[in-house]
Image (cartoon, rainbow, N blue to C red):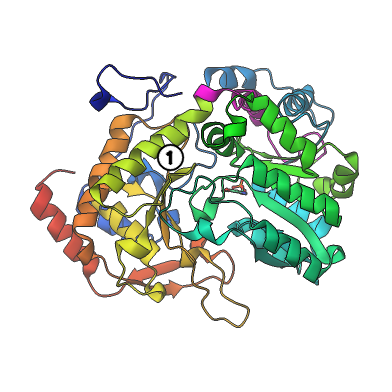
Amino acid sequence: MAVKFYKSENQVPLEMHKVRMVQKLNLLPVDERLRAMQEAGNNTFLLNNRDVYMDMLTDSGVNAMSDLQFAAMMRADDAYAGTETFTRVKAAIKEVFGCDNVLPAHQGRACENILAEAYCAPGKVALMNFHFTTTKAHATRCGATVEELVDPAGLIPQSDNPFKGNYNLENLRNRIDEIGSENVAYVRVEAGTNLIGGQPVSLENMLAVTDICHEKGVRSVLDASLLQDNIYFMKTREARCKYMELKEIYHLLADHFDIIYFSARKLSFAKGGIICSKDPKFTREMQVYIPLYEGFLTYGGIDVRTMEAMAQGLYESLDMEYISQGPLFIDYLAKELDAYGVPVILPPGGLGCHLNAGAFVPDLPHNQYPAAAVGCALYIISGVRGMERGTVSEQREPDGTERYAELELQRLAVPRRVFTLSQIKYVADRVKWLWDNRNLIGGLEWTEEPDVLRFFFGRMKEIGYWQEELVAKFKQDFGDSL
Ligand SMILES: Cc1ncc(COP(=O)(O)O)c(C=O)c1O
């Protein structure tokens, strides 16, 4: 929890860890950043990391590992089948979730592929509070449709609603009745709802969703990739969780959900993915796909050293000092920006600070991709790389028309335990400058648009010469500073 400072004006989030290994960073001159952005097709995914000062693209697979995780990696037991390492992963899952049935897969989306293969088919509907890009792509690839039932209050960019990821329970109940239980592939709750700003779901809401699922006889699935942040918010924002042990909350969820899966690139500060369940019926239904797509049942495509890091990282997800670091830094950044008038998603969520690009550049139409444009501008003026979480991250409708995102966000992820506070302050400073110069930000248009997951490899170009004008203004204000 936050340590109290003597003078309230000195209050900052205090790191409860120290840095024992460092990596040199590059901050290129602004002209080179402009060149790098344009060569990357105005897609931050296509930048080379050596051209990036702060990599805020994602919190996935880039969290800092602990000394104990590195130590654990040294004792990995390499075997095709029956490795002791997997026994240790199972023990960690048992400790954290209380589940005995565990399937490994190489990352979160691989778990989603397995779920989709097992339960999604033409005519089936996958219900979720909100979709995640890869979740939806897998479900629809297998012929199912995806419907979102997040409470509309969750889509209001700035509010004091502490749990904006909550399901609208009445709509959930009604939709299951309309669709018919037999046609529901699964009801998925995404903890720390990614695409609406890392917004949490309350414990009460999660349990109510599973109650409805049990009553209606449909499968409930918890995407626990961002559960660690979500549990921090349950502890700090939900009265009933205040005095609960973290482990109690994890266990309670596992008692209620049929299936839990997660990306270990987030939960457990490692890499890999896990599907687990209290009831072996579910893992039995899915396990046939693991050797087919991932690897043998005791490694699932994950390197054994990585599995050791995952096992240790899972124990660390029970440590409030570790799990609070990300949310506290994000809270600091979001409140700094909000106080300056920059539109950010409030209350701050987990995984990153989200700029509300729709309000940042309100005159830029959806079809000129405001969230992507803000991201390009930010990289050019700071070397900070974020990720578009707006219309570019959507899939076009089957008839080819554009599907405009509910929220146009530029996400500045804060990988857990990685950045120092002075780096976060640098980000705040440059975003404030960009806000003051937002009239210079223009639109983007496609030059290469892939059909599926276009945000990963699509290429765009600036409309007009606004990026050159932005660089000229930067030089005017900052002189020869990087
Ligand atoms: C909520 C959620 N689910 C699933 C995934 C997919 O996980 P992975 O990146 O390990 O494939 C992510 C990744 O960001 C996520 O945030």
Q: Secondary structure at mark 1?
A: loop
Q: Which residues are magenta?
A: 296-321
Image quarter in which the C terminus is found: top left
The answer to whether residue 358 is left or right of residue 349 is left
Which of these two is toward me, 301 or 55? Answer: 55
Name the quadrant containing residue 463. Answer: bottom left
Dot 1, crowdedness within 10 Å: few (<14), some or many (≥20)? Answer: many
Q: Position of residue 234 (x, y in %)?
A: 57, 36
Q: Is residue 52 above or below residue 4?
A: below
The answer to whether residue 354 is left or right of residue 61 is left
Q: Is residue 203 visible?
A: yes
Taking the spot 39% from the left edge, 53% from the top edge, the residue there is: 47
Name the quadrant containing residue 256. Answer: top right
**Residue 319 part of the magenta segment:** yes
Q: Position of residue 72 (x, y in %)?
A: 63, 19
Taking the spot 25% from the left edge, 65% from the top edge, the residue there is: 441
**Residue 418 part of the magenta segment:** no
Does mark 1 have its CB less than 8 Å from ligand 1? no
